[in-house]
Each structure stands twice: as C-alpha cells, then as structure tokens.
Amino acid sequence: MARPPRHRAHTVRTPRHRHRAHMARRAVTPFARQVRDADVTLIVQVTDLDEARRARDAGADVIVAQGSEAGGHGGSRATLPFVPAVADLVSPTPVLAAGGISDGRGVAAALALGAAGALVGTRFQASLEALVPAQVAKALVDGRGGDTERSRVLDIARGAPWPRRYTARTLPNAFLDRWRGREDELDHDTTAQQAYRDAAARGDLDAVPVWAGEGLDLITSVESAGDIVAALAAGAERALAAAGNSHG
C-alpha cells in the first residue's frame, strides 16, 4: 500500500508468469475491457455504493466491499452495514467483505452479511511470509485496534497523491502525533517533509506508516500464512455451526 497509482493493481502469477487476476481500486472503467479481453479475472475494491455501481457496470468479476475499519487507504463506510448493501446492489456478482476481519468469526460474519468470502489484509501482514520488517510485525502484534486512526498526515509527508477522501488507517507514531490537525501547514513545510523522508529511509517507525486495521486486537502472534488460512476456515466453521445451533 505504499504508493497510490491511479489504477492500483495486484496480480497473481502462475509459474509461467501469466496474470490470472487484476485487482483495482476505484477508476477501473477505462481498463476493464482490456483486462477481461485478456481472460484475466477483474477484482475491484470499492468504498461506497457509487463505486460499487461503477464496478458492476464495468463488468467486474468480483467486488470487494471495503469498510472503514480496514488498514491502509479507504473510505468512511462501516463494514457491517456496507457489505450487505453492496451485495444487494451488485448481485449476482460475488462480493468479498474487507475491513476489520482478522479471525474466523469475521469471515463467518461476512458470509452472513451476504458476501461470498472475505479479503483479509492486516492479519497477513503479521505472517512469516509478509514482506515487512520484523519490527512492523511486532508493532502489529503489540498494537490495539483502538489505537489505529485514519489520517492524511503521512500521505502528505510522503508526497503520496491520494485523493483527500481516501484517508489511511495506521498505528500512531511520533510524526503523526506532531502533525495531527496541522495538515495544511505540513503541506507547505518542505523541511518537515524532508525530515520525514530521512526518517523513512532509516525505517524509523516513529515516522513511517504501519498500515493496520481495527481487527488488530485479534492478532496475538506471527504465524505462517498457511496456518492463518487454516485458522480462519476452522474458526468460520465453528462460528457458523454455533450460530445454527443457537437457533435450535
């Protein structure tokens, strides 16, 4: 999530390096036909109903309904009411729920809300395979969901041209504390921006963003991605079974 190109994409590659999936945010329409003509699955992440409608009309194969509890950049809609609204709007296109989902109970909740599954981010940052420094993984395990916050401060300092409406949820740090509420001033303070870049080059967590969602309270250890997937699946099965049993 470090840089926000206009059409942000994630691809999954096979051993022959053919793209199988393309994940985009927001303005997908200009490239949707090219992606689909290449026989590539088009996944679009949305943060409001207008974006969901545009993604549906562009022919997205999968739509990710991202709630504001998610780590990194996003909108202002809460996951719980947003996911079913998107599912109803874009049906029969499959929807994945995102935002604050860190264990199997969250996956089960996503299914109950009408999603076909969940897109999990922060939990996998605290995995053995994650391409993050060990100090970031430790910060995630030690952090709490209530400590995270949405802000533009670190984007301004990084010179990242995200639109104002897409704030970024991170753990707090000293630079964010210093400039919180002073975004316009920071935007014109080149000395502070250079100080940020110098600290970021050193990997100083008092400056660089640690992307983190509100599901942080449920992350208590760094595990392999395979073990995390297994725990998510098993936890979802238990939660769904318990919900079914509670209704006799």
Image (spheres, helix red, strand yellow):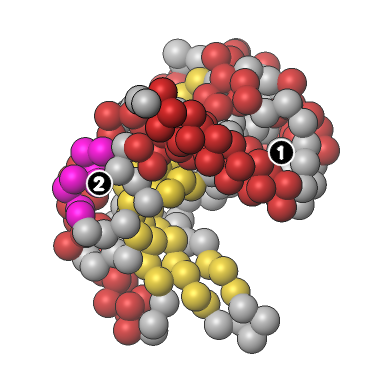
Residue 37 screen position, x and y as percent:
32, 84
Residue depicted at 67% across the width and 28% down the height: 219
Whether residue 157 appears in this view of the structure is no
Kindly report the secondary structure that dominates the magenta region of the rendered protein. helix
Amino acid under disc 1: Ala
Element type at mark 1: loop
Residue depicted at 52% across the width and 25% down the height: 214
Amino acid under disc 2: Ala
Residue 226 screen position, x and y as percent:
71, 52
Judged from this view, the residue extending furthest toward the front is 248
- Tag 1: Cα neighbours inside 10 Å, few (<14), some, or many (≥20)? many
Return the residue at label 2.
Answer: 87
Residue 22 screen position, x and y as percent:
45, 67
- Tag 2: Cα neighbours inside 10 Å, few (<14), some, or many (≥20)? many
Return the residue at label 1.
Answer: 126
Element type at mark 2: helix
141 vs 122: above or below? above
124 vs 143: above or below? below
